[in-house]
Amino acid sequence: MGKSRLLMYALWGVMAFGLLPKLEAQDALAVGNRDIIFLIDSSMGTTITNAVREFIKRFIDTIPIGPDQVQVGVATFSTTPKMEFNLNSFSSKESLSSALARIKPKPATDVNIGAALEFVRTNMFTPESGSRIQDQVPQLVLLLTSKKSKDDVQQPAEALRQMGVMTLAAGSKAADEAELKQIAFNDDLVFLLKDFRVLLRIPRVIIPSLTLLSGDVVMEGPTESAMDNVIDLVQNTIPSLTSKKEKAQDRHIGIIGGCQDYTGAPFFAAISALKVGADVSHVFCTKDAAPVIKSYSPDLIVHPVLDSPNGVQEIEKWLPSLHSLVVGPGLGREDVPLKNAKEIIKRSKLREIPIIIDGDGLWLVANEPSIIQGYQRGILTTNFMEFTRLYEAMRHEPPDSTDHKRSAQQLSIAFGQLTLVLKGEDDIITDGKKVLTCNQESSGRHCGGQGDLLSGSLGVFAHWAFNSPPDATKGMNPSLVAAFGAASLVRQCNRQAFHKHGRSTITSDMIQEIGGAFKTLFEN
């Protein structure tokens, strides 16, 4: 099993407890089956060992534990390895916590990481020890060490890789970065910390490369698809117009946004959704914004409830009739609307409604990534400033300005392979596995509000894509197809509007072009 095609197992459970400070009891993480072994350097001293134990305990407290769910084993090492408990030793959180409490440090000057890796491979990733590797259950090992190894690590690390085990390496103090890179599957799975106590104070420092991956093959480099081929897939998802459907039987789009300062954005998103093909557009906005938004168009249904104390209940009663949700256009940053928007996202996820997040919705996500992380029907539409804010929140470093595609792919992976759109000269669209570039001809005129046209139209394309037969997208992620369709449409609208209006082009001009642009791209 070559490195470039090693199955990238769903790693969310390993470190997702980094979000624990914001998790409630009911927010237990939805983690697929996997076997995880923590390989701990026992020479780190009592204080650090206690921190690592607490780190693991918090993880265990937030995931389903059991022989048919997540199994956890622990081994320690200094010069020689020791099995603390096997994958099948304990099947409850309580018994695992008790076993963790019995782990003691073992002072030592040197450590042999290679021997510890080999011990784990030959003694713990076996059916007798509870490993479900023969059942294709993901196998993970997380190394935590504070020293450079005295023995060779390359051969045992490669043996684990060839076996199908994903190895992650975290080091502090005297750990050697080059050595950790030899051990880990790739450089994104290497974590250098000043002190492992950081994991308790700022747990998310280790999350970015350890997020929910789907279990599909992830190539080391982005793959791109020809535009014409993807446009064909978009066309496959677009339903035919028919007189057999009753009015408003299908395609209801909800927009969460609109406040006193920002009334144009939700209007642009909602009216774009209608012009693309939605039957009904609902705008859930604040009380002050409602009269203004209503005055823009009688075609929208406007609900002045977003800043209401019972706003969640008022919006939730409409969720059964909504087919997609756009969160963020004109949302603003006041506490009550943000709180209500957050709760609506949670409740929409339970109904498996496609959720597009834009504008101030992205600001909300940057502060609380867990509200959308790992939701496979979620799509983030970002400009570069929004993208940078999200990237720094998740990876604690700025994105690579020389390689936007790779940075976008990394951020998508950090969000659990959420589909991400990075708007720019060319629009980059990725789900972490595949990278598409939309370079449909546009113009040099970028209008304020153009992103709202994208998010609103994407709400419709997302509903179509997820509601299409499985063969319509030929195996491509429906979110990718939908995002590519919406991005292409917006760029074509911009081109046509600019042809007529030149420098004076505004978003309202672009919206008037939706019908013609749609026909040009998808109906000719």
Image (tube, helix red, strand yellow):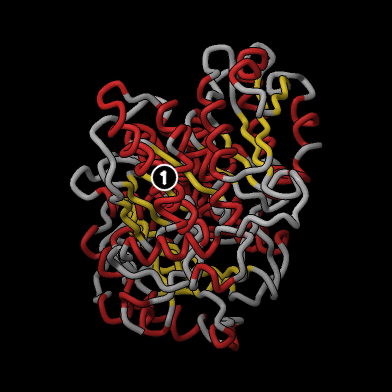
Rendering quarter of residue 103: bottom right
User: Image height check: is 185 above or below 354?
Assistant: below
Rendering quarter of residue 470: bottom right
Q: Quadrant of the N terminus?
A: bottom left
Please name whichever residue, 500 or 106, is drawn nearer the observer in this view of the structure. 500
Amino acid, disc 1: Ala
- Seen at 47% across and 35% down, the residue is 453
Q: Residue 211, percent across and down?
A: 48, 56
Q: Would residue 299 be found to the left or right of residue 489 on screen?
A: right
Please name whichever residue, 297 or 471, is drawn nearer the observer in this view of the structure. 297
Q: How many marks?
A: 1
Q: Residue 313, percent across and down?
A: 80, 31
User: Image height check: is 324 above or below 245?
Assistant: above
- Seen at 31% across and 76% down, the residue is 3
- Seen at 73% across and 59% down, the residue is 94
Q: Residue 248, percent across and down?
A: 74, 44
User: Image height check: is 15 above or below 310?
Assistant: below
Q: Quadrant of the C terminus?
A: bottom left
Residue at image mark 1: 517
Q: Residue 43, percent across and down?
A: 39, 59
Q: Is any atom of residue 207 visible in this view? A: no
Q: Would residue 29 be found to the left or right of residue 140 on screen?
A: right
Q: Would residue 403 be found to the left or right of residue 83 on screen?
A: left
- Seen at 34% across and 58% down, the residue is 436
Q: Secondary structure at mark 1?
A: helix
Rendering quarter of residue 210: bottom left
